[in-house]
Amino acid sequence: MNTVWTITRRELSSFFDSLVAVIMIVLFLGFTGFFTWISGADIFMTGQASLRSFFGIAYWTLFFFIPALTMKLLAEEKKTGTLEMLLTKPVSDRQVILGKYLAAVILVAIALAFTLPYVITISKIGNLDTGGTFCGYLALLLISAAYAGIGIFSSSLTNNQIVAFLTALFIGLFFHILFGIIASGMKGMAGQIINSLSMSVHFESLARGVIDTKDLIYFGSIIFLTLFLTEVSLSKRNEYR
Amino acid sequence: MDIVIENLTKRFGNQKAVDNISLKVSTGEIIGFLGPNGAGKTTTMKIITNYISADEGRVFIGGRLVDDDPGRIKKHIGYLPENNPLYQEMPVIDYLEFCARLHNIEKGVIGRRVAEIVRITGLNREKHKKIGELSKGYRQRVGLAQAMIHDPEILILDEPTSGLDPNQIAEIRKLIRELGREKTVILSTHILPEVEATCDRIFIINKGRLVADGTPENLRTQAQGSDIVKVRIEDGDPDQIFKSLMQVRSVSLVDFTDRHMNRFEIHCRAETAKREIFNLCVSRKWVLTEMTPYEAKLEDIFRELTMN
């Protein structure tokens, strides 16, 4: 656990040193702030003391931002060869993956924490649904964790960051909207199964303020599966030069 | 800690990168790993350090099978990978602290240990610079520092001096010799004088196979077969000298190397040959102005074993 945390800390400080973290947080706050307060279906339009519009826009912003955070995690180390240096220390593949994954999730959590002033402001304006808000944040964190899993897996497939970014977006797109669209055109069991794979279904059910084990299992299995596949993919170094 | 490799084989696709290599390295030895590019040196090192796993064969380190508990064995190994990969954006000192932490060095000791290794590797003035800003020689020192931060019993260095200038090579070589005094060291290189200067024993591998194993002196006599001396004899007719030399009992073969300068290359059959040649010259009143024993260079041995 110590080792995982050491790797997480290095990864986080690398995010902040390279300004990736700062740019990401500023852009995230910019986008969500703009659409929550100023434009579109903002708070003043809807006239409700609710963070629904913020959750909606954050859902989309994170979808694009997380692949940009995770793309370098393994791809860059594979390219520069530092992965070899890292893995020949008393560190297992799993510890490296978990450490890096955790760093990405923590960075997103920090970005989300910066939106807490929104919550405070709105709670002053009107009667804010505390439980719903909590669930909304939980939902955002869970989809971030799921996309970070997809991102780190994509990063393990290649040593090119751009390829990793696009792969993560491509895989993410299925969960984000495509499964929903495909399912809407189908009937019966198959439609239901594909629909239940859609991220937005689970996101909305959580954001509505209901913590359902089904949703938690859904996010948990995506995270587990992607991390597992990352480990498998990393061990492929045995087969190629 | 000793290293024992038994029948190691590693394939990449259809190609055998390492082909049934067996070798033993005793504690405290400095081993030179020689071979042309793509011979399998790096692959062997990657297997020893547990970065990749072998298809067949076993590696024992300190009597333990490496695959059994890689985490534990990795603690005893310091490794400098090929091309010395480092986090360019990290300051030297942060990087070394990071490595120390990965090696589970106790918190209270890390600072002292990092300071010590910084001093040993001569990085004191550069320690707050980012690694990417350092010259290649200093970066190599950082590479060595990270490999030795935990004072490992085994050091594995993949081309530690590649791309350095002669001064830097001499410095790094000195550093390796000093630091490797009580360690088992395996280093790979193309630079043959380096091996002669630093190593106790040499392994030459070619196309994945071990083709030679021995001390530099051993390999030399093996490759050469008979002693060769180069002589120059003045004040005589070259043809006559040639004939007389051929008649010396302990001489098996005489060659002109330079007829006008009366230079010959003589293959000897016995130890006494040099004396007999000298006595011959004295009796004929020829002046022997040069007599050099010829040592096959490591280059020749290397070329002989790896070309074909």
Image (cartoon, grey):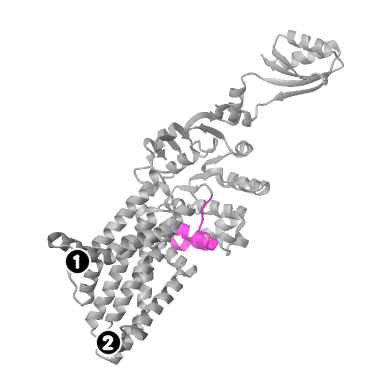
Q: Position of residue B210 (x, y in %)?
A: 49, 30
Quick check: A130 above or below A201? Answer: below
Q: Amino acid at mark 2?
A: Thr
Identify residue for label 1.
A184
Q: Residues within 10 Å of mark 2 (few under 14, many from 20)?
A: few
Q: Position of residue A1 (x, y in %)?
A: 35, 60
Q: Amino acid at mark 1?
A: Ser
Residue B51 appears anywhere in the view: yes
**Of marks 2 and 1, the one in the foreground:** 1
Q: Chain of mark 1?
A: A
- Kindly identify which numbered label has been placed on residue A46: 2
The one nearer the camera, B171 or A219, is A219
Quick check: A145 above or below B194? Answer: below
Answer left or right for A31 relative to A174.
right
Which segment did they paint magenta? Answer: B84-112
> Gap between marks 2 and 1, in whole Å?
28 Å
